[in-house]
Image (cartoon, helix red, strand yellow):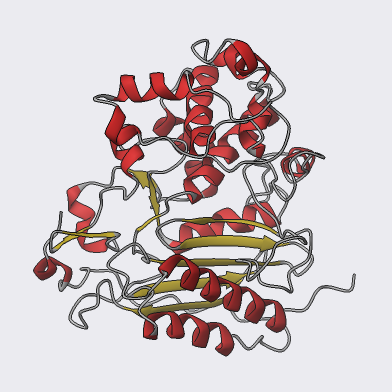
């Protein structure tokens, strides 16, 4: 935990907020994006946020809003140095490690999960493939309160691997944290490397994501946007997800902390179909496309990602204007990232909704803000005609 007094400290030596790269041609107007994010603060949905918008090779817009807490004396967040609890955006990054391993031939996503995690076996579980974990079509239940029912990481994992399926595998998508937890175990088994080290080797290091990590050290507390307010104390640097806490802070479903600038580099690599900014190949374009293709049973789900659902009722986090080829993900704490290749644009929108939100029905209010941001970006950046 971190005291409110510590949050008033200014991050030493952080330097100025980065200036967006000059745009070729008329600059898009993102003032509507900024207004939508500020309305979220005015409604009490979150005290602080950052937004980075860009293309495959440049940053179009980079802005910060509000403060770490509701106190105006607390630091203002930054796009380049503030660390945010990514929550379920962790799933996307873990899936990207799977993508890299598929591309290298060290992971077979069509294989049963039991090949890599023998404890996950028996009955319908034998038919669950790694791809089904990525598409959320495994049939596993959405959630188990492991932090209440288990006394150790080992007990928690045993409950996950023995969980009964809600429906036959491959039937339809049911979003589940258990899929992410199991994927982490699959990746560790297939690689022989702990998950945190694996993600560093396969994702963070090659993409230059120098500020993305599990279990941030105490020395970085002043740079971390708090994600909880418990018993009058501000909590920062501890993963908000209680199941991830039970699993030691390192899991495939939650636990990562990152800056907006790091996530921008991640999104740009996807927009470039796996080509790094130095021109080298991180993964093949064919593997990228495989992960961006769903199945008849997966609905809007892609491998690790979600996409706009034409049958969705009410406001969508993707808004109403993005193309069907767009893909993205959100996180419980208030995080979001999406990519629209038809516009050559990505958005990273990070906020700490889970910290002492003052809004009624804050999840619904957060969805409204995300939809407004998405539509504002879509209006500012038209689809390419070639």
Is residue 9 toward the left or the right of residue 76 in the image?
A: left
Q: Residue 190 at what x, y percent from top left? A: 55, 18
Which image quadrant for residue 229?
bottom left
> In this picture, is 120 found above or below 303?
above
> In this picture, is 97 found above or below 26?
above
Is residue 58 toward the left or the right of residue 296 in the image?
A: left
Residue at 46% across / 38% down in the picture?
Answer: 143
Q: Residue 366 at what x, y percent from top left? A: 48, 70
Viewer-side residue, 288 vs 113: 113
Is residue 13 toward the left or the right of residue 146 in the image?
A: left
Q: How many marks?
A: 0
Residue 95 in sight here: yes
Q: Residue 71 at what x, y percent from top left? A: 20, 79
Q: Outermost residue, front direction? A: 166
Viewer-side residue, 202 vs 374: 374
Q: Outermost residue, right direction? A: 386
> In this picture, is 381 found above or below 323?
below
Residue at 47% across / 32% down in the picture?
Answer: 181
Viewer-side residue, 196 vs 364: 364
Viewer-side residue, 41 vs 169: 169
Which image quadrant for residue 295?
top right
Residue at 53% across / 30% down in the picture?
Answer: 183
Quadrant the C terminus occupies: bottom right
Residue 277 in sight here: no
Quadrant the N terminus occupies: bottom left
Residue at 62% across / 28% down in the picture?
Answer: 101
Q: Residue 273 at what x, y percent from top left? A: 73, 50
């Amino acid at each position: 935990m971190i005291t409110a007094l510590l949050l008033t400290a200014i991050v030493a030596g952080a330097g100025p907020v980065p200036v967006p790269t000059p745009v070729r041609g008329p600059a898009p107007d993102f003032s509507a994006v900024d207004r939508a994010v500020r309305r979220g603060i005015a409604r009490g949905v979150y005290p602080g946020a950052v937004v980075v918008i860009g293309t495959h090779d440049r940053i179009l817009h980079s802005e910060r809003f509000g403060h770490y807490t509701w106190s105006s004396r607390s630091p203002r967040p930054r796009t380049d140095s503030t660390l945010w609890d990514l929550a379920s955006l962790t799933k996307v990054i873990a899936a990207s490690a799977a993508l890299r391993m598929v591309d290298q031939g060290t992971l077979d996503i069509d294989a049963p999960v039991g090949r890599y995690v023998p404890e996950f076996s028996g009955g319908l579980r034998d038919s669950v493939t790694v791809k089904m974990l990525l598409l959320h079509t495994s049939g596993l239940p959405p959630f188990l309160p492991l932090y209440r029912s288990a006394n150790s990481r080992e007990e928690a994992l045993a409950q996950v691997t023995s969980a009964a399926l809600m429906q036959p595998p491959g039937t339809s998508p049911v979003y589940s944290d258990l899929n992410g937890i199991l994927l982490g175990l699959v990746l560790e088994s297939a690689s022989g490397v702990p998950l945190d080290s694996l993600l560093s080797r396969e994702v963070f290091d090659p993409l230059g994501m120098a500020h993305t990590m599990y279990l941030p050290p105490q020395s970085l507390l002043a740079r971390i946007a708090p994600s909880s307010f418990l018993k009058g104390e501000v909590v920062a640097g501890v993963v908000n997800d209680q199941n991830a806490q039970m699993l030691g802070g390192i899991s495939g479903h939650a636990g990562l902390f990152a800056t907006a600038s790091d996530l921008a580099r991640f999104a740009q690599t996807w927009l470039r179909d796996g080509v790094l900014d130095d021109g080298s190949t991180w993964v093949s374009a064919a593997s990228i496309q495989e992960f961006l293709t769903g199945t008849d049973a997966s609905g809007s789900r892609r491998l690790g990602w979600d996409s706009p659902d034409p049958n969705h009722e009410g406001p969508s986090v993707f808004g109403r204007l993005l193309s069907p080829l767009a893909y993205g993900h959100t996180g419980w704490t208030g995080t979001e990232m999406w990519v629209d290749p038809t516009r050559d644009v990505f958005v990273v929108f990070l906020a700490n909704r889970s910290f002492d939100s003052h809004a009624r029905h804050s999840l619904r209010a957060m969805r409204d803000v995300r939809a407004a941001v998405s539509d504002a970006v879509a209006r500012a950046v038209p689809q390419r005609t070639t």
